[in-house]
Image (cartoon, helix red, strand yellow):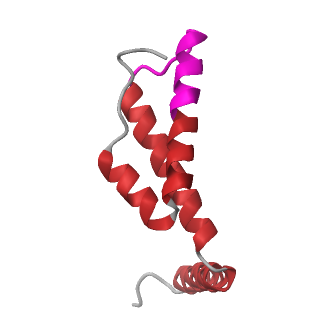
Amino acid sequence: MSLDRPRPARAAIWLLRRVSSHDATDAAVGDILETLDELHAMGRGPRWPNVWLSRQLLSTFAAAMRAATPNCVMKGRSDRLRQGYGESRRNAVKVEDRPLYVH
């Protein structure tokens, strides 16, 4: 463990604790810091450790949010997004079929 190890951003930890338990947050942060130490020990540490650490914490937050969100909510969203995409494609085809100008 290095002495100049970056500290996790307080805002990222606060966000993670909103969707996860205190113990789970501490475990996740500890795992991320251990991974960072292992990367440094192998000589493969990130160029900007604070950015890497924040990115890892935000990725963990996103995973916790997906786990905390009921499947029915996510299913409805993806169906609506897919329908919206299909409607956009149909409308684009309709526009392409029309003449650009009329004499």
The image quarter containing residue 97 is bottom right
Q: Say if 63 sits above or below 89 in the image.
A: above
Residue at 56 percent across and 14 percent down: it is 44
Residue 45 in picture, x, y percent from top left: 51, 18
Residue 12 in picture, x, y percent from top left: 37, 51
Q: Residue furthest left?
A: 10
The image quarter containing residue 90 is bottom right
Q: Which residues are magenta?
A: 33-48
Residue at 40 percent across and 41 percent down: it is 54
Residue 13 in the magenta stretch? The answer is no
Residue 30 in picture, x, y percent from top left: 53, 37
Q: Quadrant of the C terminus?
A: bottom left
Q: Say if 48 sits above or below 57 in the image.
A: above
- In depth, the one of 84 and 88 nearer the eye is 84
Q: Residue furthest bottom?
A: 103
- In depth, the one of 91 and 56 nearer the eye is 56
Q: Say if 27 sits above or below 76 in the image.
A: above
Residue 24 in picture, x, y percent from top left: 56, 54
Residue 43 in the magenta stretch? The answer is yes
Residue at 67 percent across and 81 percent down: it is 75
- In depth, the one of 16 and 81 nearer the eye is 16
Tell how many labels. 0
- In depth, the one of 19 and 83 nearer the eye is 19
